[in-house]
Amino acid sequence: MSQIKVLLVEDSAVAMSIYENMLASSPHIEVVGKAANGKEGMALIPQVKPDVICTDLQMPQMDGYEFIKQVMAAYPVPILVLSNAVQKTDVDNIYAAMKAGAVDIMAKPAGNNDSEAVQKELITKIRVLATKKVSAKPLS
């Protein structure tokens, strides 16, 4: 099986670096693109043709919700939301992200978390999402 191509869309350089390091540990995953916001992410998709997109929700220029809607309308691929805004208590945010077209959510790892467990969860989620087919959702 070829590697799973992942596009990371995240405005925090620190978080971006953490995700990259976590994903680099998996021989099954390759980070093919990085964008600091949804606008940059949209521009990269046709070039890097990701199998899975990981995006934050709170970003400048184009936030995660709008980015997810645009992706699902133009280039439907499974999207994993990685954000501080999707803790277990953030039901409205989780609902909005799923309604926009995200397939899965994961709270951004906090600094004191067990990073090995978080890394394993992230890699597992991406490997599962890469096997999912998603349909286009027209912008409404």
Image (cartoon, rainbow, N blue to C red):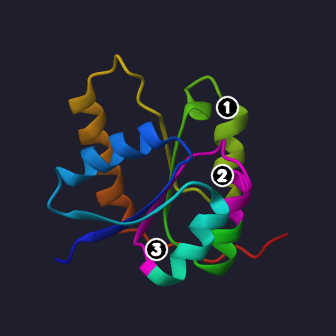
Tell me which corner region of the image, top left, top right, bottom left or bottom right, holds residue 85: top right
Residue 137 lies left or right of residue 43; in this view the side is right
Residue 14 lies left or right of residue 30; in this view the side is right
Q: Earlier in the sequence, mark 2 or mark 3?
A: 2
Q: Earlier in the sequence, mark 1 or mark 3?
A: 1
Task: Give the residues in magenta.
Answer: 48-69
Q: Position of residue 7 (x, y in %)?
A: 44, 64
Amino acid carrying mark 1 in the image: Val
- Please state which of the two labelled residues, at mark 2 or mark 1, is closer to the viewer: 2
Above or below, comparing residue 117 to residue 22 in the picture: above
Q: Residue at left 35%, top 56%?
A: 126
The span from disc 2 to disc 1 (Cα, nearest Å) is 16 Å
User: Which residue is more in the foreground, 97 or 116?
Assistant: 116
Q: Are marks 1 and 3 in contact (CB under 8 Å)?
A: no
Q: Position of residue 24 (x, y in %)?
A: 21, 53
The span from disc 1 to disc 3 (Cα, nearest Å) is 25 Å
Residue 133's disc is 3
The span from disc 2 to disc 3 (Cα, nearest Å) is 20 Å
Q: Residue at left 58%, top 56%?
A: 102
Q: Position of residue 101 (x, y in %)?
A: 64, 60
Q: Residues within 10 Å of mark 3 (few under 14, many from 20)?
A: few
Magenta run includes residue 93: no
Pointer 1 residue: 91
Pointer 2 residue: 64
Magenta run includes residue 67: yes
- Please state which of the two labelled residues, at mark 2 or mark 3, is closer to the viewer: 2
Q: Secondary structure at mark 3?
A: loop
Amino acid carrying mark 3 in the image: Lys
Q: Of all residues shown, which one is farthest toward the right?
A: 140
Camera sees residue 76 = no
